[in-house]
Image (spheres, helix red, strand yellow):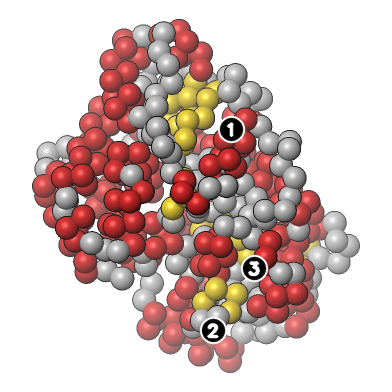
């Protein structure tokens, strides 16, 4: 989505928006359609409905890319929903720059969001030109392996602590009749796995050099070649049903004892919880995998497209406030598998996997920004496409993919 197109529609929209639904009914678009996600989002809807004056109209659209595209089209077409999920990233900055989003700065100031939200990087993407345009609801990290404990026990292996372990253990796991690594063959999942390999094999310093500093030598270095090489070796570890498979159907393979492990963000935990599985008993959660795991602090935010109706605007602000309230933060994040964005809530009830994540997030050394918070949506999308092409084209050489990778990073914003 190009700025110019958004800017063009923005001025027309400001003059023409006419909102006809009930003032306090807010349509909320999100992509939380798996069992675990639905359980978590329904807590938000229930809480909002319970305030006695507003109601949450749920619009769930499968797939993050699809949902975000619909939100963009609806806003540009003059039929904006009242609230929409995006990742905590640069995905929505053009909407804010074009003046299409409700400014939450006064509410943020009143409720001291800058003081309670931690780490600072979680609220940063919401702040554009000094104003706050989104409310972060959770911290999600991509760098986790989700394991089936019974399979590791049966084959007599420890859970992997590195990507090399995942590769080395694959033969034994395959021989015992299990999928060594379940991968969902969709672009964003292939890219997520690549990010995990990058962080596990290359480390945080290399990540920052390549993505934050856009250091061309780093992007072309032997260390990045090693990341691509390792990633390429994982192709043989998955199964024939991988192509196009949803992330949660892939998680089910681990839950149901068909696959040993899946690399997925911590939202996978919601699926295990829903299936009645116990953390560190039935399933394991390995951060990294790496001896010094680093987690990216991504997650979800809500934006509130501008409406030409003060009553709706007031309800949008009530929803924004509710999403950050301490009680909602604890309940929602416990169900979702994410960590709260507030540092002042009591997470004593968190299970051992959440506790591991919370402990890592406590130390800045262990955290990094996700790619989509560093790169523009366009650049991030080009990298994802390239990574997916490499994954699906075993004949593509590491030298070739690495050249293109470095070129996109030099070229893109
Ligand atoms: C991510 C989102 C998570 C999770 C996941 C799979 O983009 O941040 O909340 O739901 O997609 O749907």
Q: Label 3 neighbourhood size at 10 Å, few (<14), some (14-19), many (20+)?
A: some
Task: Mark 2 vs mark 3: give the one in front.
Answer: 3
**Residue drawn at x 73%, y 50% as measured from the top left:** 345
Residue nearest the viewer, comparing 301 with 131:
131
| Res 383 label | none
* Mark earlier in primary sequence (2, 1): 2
Name the quadrant containing residue 242. top left
Asked whether the residues under the numbered discs 1 and 3 touch, taking CB atoms below 8 Å apart as contact, a structural biologist would say no
Vertical side of 299 occupied by 75: above or below:
below
**Residue drawn at x 50%, y 51% as measured from the top left:** 364
**Residue drawn at x 26%, y 63% as measured from the top left:** 214
Residue 77 lies left or right of residue 399; in this view the side is right
Vertical side of 3 occupied by 231: above or below:
above
* Mark earlier in primary sequence (2, 3): 2
Tell me the CA gap for discs 2 and 1: 40 Å
Tell me the CA gap for discs 2 and 3: 22 Å
- Circle 2 sits on which residue? 99
Residue nearest the viewer, comparing 277 with 116:
116
Task: Mark 2 vs mark 1: give the one in front.
Answer: 1
Q: Position of residue 395 (x, y in %)?
A: 12, 39
- Circle 3 sits on which residue? 114
Vertical side of 404 occupied by 330: above or below:
above
């Amino acid at each position: 989505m190009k700025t110019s197109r958004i800017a063009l529609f923005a001025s027309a929209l400001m003059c023409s928006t006419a909102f006809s639904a009930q003032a306090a009914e807010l349509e909320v678009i999100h992509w939380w359609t798996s069992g675990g996600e639905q359980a978590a989002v329904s807590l938000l809807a229930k809480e909002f409905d319970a305030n006695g004056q507003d109601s949450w109209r749920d619009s769930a659209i499968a797939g993050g890319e699809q949902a975000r595209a619909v939100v963009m089209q609806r806003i540009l077409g003059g039929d904006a929903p009242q609230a929409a999920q995006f990742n905590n990233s640069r995905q929505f900055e053009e909407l804010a720059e074009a003046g299409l989003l409700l400014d939450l700065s006064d509410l943020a100031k009143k409720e001291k969001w800058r003081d309670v939200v931690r780490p600072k990087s979680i609220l940063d993407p919401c702040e554009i030109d000094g104003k706050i345009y989104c409310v972060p609801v959770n911290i999600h990290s991509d760098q986790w392996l989700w394991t089936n404990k019974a399979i590791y026990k049966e084959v007599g292996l420890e859970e992997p602590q590195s990507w090399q372990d995942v590769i080395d253990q694959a033969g034994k796991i395959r021989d015992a009749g299990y999928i060594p690594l379940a991968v969902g063959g969709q672009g964003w999942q292939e890219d997520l796995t690549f990010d995990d390999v990058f962080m596990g094999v290359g480390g945080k310093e290399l990540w920052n050099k390549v993505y934050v500093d856009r250091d061309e030598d780093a992007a072309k270095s032997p260390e990045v070649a090693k990341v691509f090489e390792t990633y390429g070796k994982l192709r043989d570890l998955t199964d024939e049903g991988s192509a196009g498979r949803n992330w949660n159907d892939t998680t089910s393979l681990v839950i149901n004892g068909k696959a040993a492990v899946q690399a997925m963000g911590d939202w996978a935990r919601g699926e295990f919880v829903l299936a009645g599985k116990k953390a560190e008993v039935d399933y394991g959660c390995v951060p990294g995998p790496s001896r010094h795991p680093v987690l990216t602090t991504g997650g979800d935010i809500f934006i509130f497209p501008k409406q030409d109706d003060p009553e709706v605007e007031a309800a949008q602000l009530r929803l924004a406030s509710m999403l950050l309230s301490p009680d909602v933060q604890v309940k929602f994040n416990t169900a979702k598998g994410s960590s709260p964005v507030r540092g002042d809530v009591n997470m004593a009830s968190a299970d051992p996997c959440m506790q591991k994540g919370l402990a890592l997030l406590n130390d800045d050394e262990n955290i990094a920004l996700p790619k989509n918070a560093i790169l523009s949506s366009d650049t991030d999308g080009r990298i994802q496409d390239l990574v997916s092409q490499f994954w699906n084209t075993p004949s593509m050489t590491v030298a070739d993919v690495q050249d293109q990778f470095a070129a996109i990073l030099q070229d893109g914003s």
